[in-house]
Amino acid sequence: MPNVFGVVARFPAGFKTLIPFYEAVMKKGKIEAKYKELAYLKTSSINDCRY
């Protein structure tokens, strides 16, 4: 489980909001999920976001 889900799971309102958003971003559209994940990781790296 990605850490962000573990953290947000402690805040039910945030969790209920995050899951539909994450699914909409990762599961819909023409770009494969693996490329979306790579963009996610690269963006984190560029912003020096280790979490």
Image: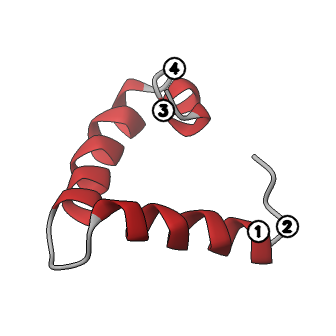
Residue at (15% x, 75% y) in the render: 29
**Gap in angstroms between the C-alphas marked 4 and 1:** 25 Å
List the residue tagged with mark 1. Answer: 45
- Left or right of 35? Residue 40 is right
**Gap in angstroms between the C-alphas marked 3 and 1:** 19 Å
Mark 3 residue crowding within 10 angstroms, few (<14) / some (14–19) / many (20+): some
Residue 5 circle label: 3
N-terminal label among 3 and 1: 3
Mark 1 residue crowding within 10 angstroms, few (<14) / some (14–19) / many (20+): few
N-terminal label among 4 and 2: 4
Q: Is residue 13 above or below residue 49?
A: above
List the residue tagged with mark 2. Answer: 48
N-terminal label among 4 and 1: 4
Residue at (29% x, 42% y) in the render: 19
Residue at (54% x, 35% y) in the render: 2
N-terminal label among 4 and 3: 3
Give coordinates of residue 24: x percent, y percent: 20, 60
Residue 23 circle label: none
**Gap in angstroms between the C-alphas marked 4 and 3:** 9 Å
Secondary element type, mark 1: helix
| Residue situated in front as seen by the camera: 46 or 32 | 32
Amino acid residing under circle 4: Arg
**Gap in angstroms between the C-alphas marked 4 and 2:** 25 Å
Secondary element type, mark 3: helix
For residue 32, what is the image quadrant? bottom left
Instruction: Kindly check if marks 4 and 1 are in contact, taking CB atoms under 8 A apart as contact.
Output: no
Mark 2 residue crowding within 10 angstroms, few (<14) / some (14–19) / many (20+): few
Amino acid residing under circle 3: Phe
Mark 4 residue crowding within 10 angstroms, few (<14) / some (14–19) / many (20+): few
